[in-house]
Image (spheres, rainbow, N blue to C red):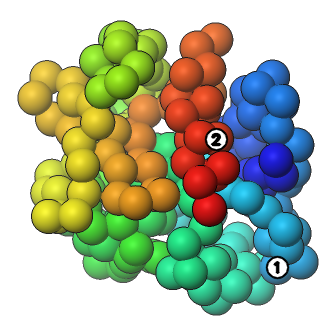
Amino acid sequence: MRIGVLAVQGAVREHILSLTRLGAEAVPVRNPEDLRGLAGLVLPGGESTAQWRLLSRSGLVEPLRKALVEGLPTLGTCAGLVLLAKEITNWPERYFGVLDVAVERNATGRQVDSFEATVSVDGLGEVPAVFIRAPAIRRVGPGVKVLGEYENVPVLVQQGTLLGATFHPELTEDLRLHEFFLSLCGKE
């Protein structure tokens, strides 16, 4: 199974390593041609405004938007979730707007406020999670299922074959969330 990882900025290498450990062919996506033949895509954590700027320069915005609208299974972690969100409560722009959630950017504070926690995820049990300047999901649309919460706030959501996590699963040794994502990619 060929899975792309958006490779303009952020935790690219870590996602590629996690997916490869599960037997997927994980490839970096840097230009529109790299989207061909993908069974799924990961939008990694990093810095959403920097990622959007680099996406715009690479010519990837519209081909990626088209792939998302057409149902390409996608996992957005941290900044990747911000790129997918329909609404950003504390930022004037909206990026792809395909996941019916409202998020607040950098809701957990500055880099120094980063932390690790355990999140209970439907069907997966207790999952380790790393929160780094994490967004917070402030609203969930009617077609979005909350799969995991931390302190009564959604941290993992699913809308069809779109997954959004406020945390970084790729920074732990636990591969269950990536494995769950791969199962969605195989249901095309």
Q: How far across and down, in percent of the image, does residue 170 sit?
A: 62, 27
Position of 91 compared to 127: left or right? left
Q: Amino acid at mark 2?
A: Leu
Residue at (44, 50) in percent of width and height: 163
Q: How far across and down, in percent of the image, does residue 185 sit?
A: 63, 51
Answer above or below: position of 17 versus 181.
Answer: above
Depth check: 9 or 21 in front?
21
Position of 48 compared to 103: left or right? right
> SS of the residue at dot 1?
helix
Quarter location, residue 110? top left
Residue at (36, 11) in percent of width and height: 126
- Marks 1 and 2, the one that precedes in the sequence: 1
Q: Amino acid at mark 1?
A: Pro
Q: How far across and down, in percent of the image, does residue 64 sit?
A: 65, 77
Residue 166 seen in this snapshot: yes
> SS of the residue at dot 2?
helix
Q: How far across and down, in percent of the image, does residue 179 sit?
A: 61, 30
Answer above or below: position of 89 versus 26.
Answer: below
Residue 91 seen in this snapshot: no
Q: Which residue is mark 2?
A: 182
Position of 29 compared to 168: left or right? right
Residue at (15, 52) in percent of width and height: 138
Answer above or below: position of 8 versus 175.
Answer: below
Residue at (56, 81) in percent of width and height: 70
> How many neighbours does mark 1 have within 10 angstroms: few (below 14), some (14-19), or many (20 or more)?
some
Position of 42 compared to 22: left or right? left
Q: Which residue is mark 1?
A: 32
Q: CA distance from mark 1 to mark 2?
A: 22 Å
Front position among marks 1 and 2: 2
Depth check: 158 or 104 in front?
158
> How many neighbours does mark 2 have within 10 angstroms: few (below 14), some (14-19), or many (20 or more)?
many
